[in-house]
Amino acid sequence: MNDKSIQLPSQLIEGGDLELLLSTQRPVILDTGRTLDEHEQSHIPGSLFIPRHEYWGNPDDGHVPFPGVRTISQWLENLGIHLTTPVILVDSGDSLWASRVAWTLAYLGHQNWAVLNGGMNLWLYEKRPSEKGEMPSPRPLPPGSLEPKIKKHLLINGEGVYNALSQEGVVILDTRSPGEYQGTSIYAERGGHIPHSIHLEWTINIRHQSPVQFRPIHEISHIYQAQGILPSHRIITLCQAGVRAAHTWLALTLAGYRNVTLYDGSWVEWAANSQYPTEVSS
């Protein structure tokens, strides 16, 4: 199959649309954010299980969240994924981990991906096809290799955020819980938040119902614009270690925001550097 034969129409796909697509085509489906046991109990037919450590380094274990371009590129090549390969990203349902992989693909210049809205929870709730058993082996590597086209504007480090504090038109968007932002819940060397940052927890992007799924795109756009966060701004998202921030990056991207950057090191990195200012809410 030629990868270019499938061009996904949107970067958020509904279960019905995916089921219809699977009746005629075979995109790569990555089952992410769940455990191997969960995958073996039930997964979309043909999907590949990928553990978190393949694409996200836990900073609590001393790793940088983004493993690096070469490491990620080789991992994707081993899965048979190239820049044109259609990829469907599936997690349990809140899209946290699917969003993290989506950001990773986007940073490498891969654009032909989509997150399954509602993930496996909604897929099973709607009684769509699933199978059990051990994960299949990665498909053979197609001819050629993945040649990244890095989108540098999608990634920023602590120094870049620090320099952005004095720049006009920049919004630093903290997506953590209220306690983390206020400084009452501390999971790093210091508590609190970056001065002048705006707090909107990542959960604002989803409907609080079961099964969980994204809010309609027009609602997401309204929420952020009502807070004065406009598409004309340069937006930097952060959380504890780049996962919740990736969810908000995806939500804003779906809503038409084109200048959204992920602070990958996020609060773990910021709090560890005494030269970076912090403040707490009274």
Image: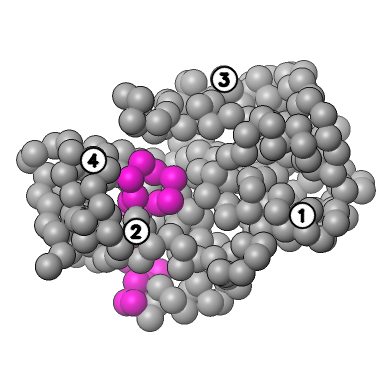
Which disc is residue 200 wearing? Answer: none
Q: Are marks 4 and 2 in contact (CB under 8 Å)?
A: no
Residue bearing mark 4 = 188
- Please tell me whether residue 238 belongs to the stretch shown in magenta: yes
Question: Tag 4: residue type?
Answer: Ala
Indicate whether 240 appears above or below 251: above
Where in the figure is residue 89, as x and y percent of width and height? 65, 44
Question: Element under label 2?
Answer: loop
Q: Amino acid at mark 2?
A: Ser
Q: Residue at x 60, y 72 (%)?
A: 216
Q: Amino acid at mark 1?
A: Trp
Q: Is residue 212 above or below residue 230?
A: above
| Residue situated in front as seen by the camera: 86 or 22 | 22
Mark 4 to mark 3 CA distance (whole Å)? 31 Å
In which quadrant of the rendered view does residue 170 lie? bottom left
Task: Tell me the tag on residue 74.
Answer: 3
The answer to whether the residues at label 4 and label 3 have Cβ atoms under 8 Å apart is no
According to the picture, the residue beneath numbered tag 2 turns out to be: 177
Q: Are marks 1 and 4 in contact (CB under 8 Å)?
A: no
Q: Secondary structure at mark 1?
A: helix
Residue span colored magenta:
227-245
Q: CA distance from mark 4 to mark 2?
A: 14 Å
Q: Which of disc 2 and disc 1 is earlier in sequence?
A: 1
Whole-angstrom CA distance, mark 3 to mark 1, is 30 Å
Q: Are marks 3 and 2 in contact (CB under 8 Å)?
A: no
| Tag 3: amino acid | Gln
Q: Which residue is mark 1?
A: 123
Quadrant of the drawing holding the N terminus: top right
The CA span between labels 3 and 2 is: 34 Å
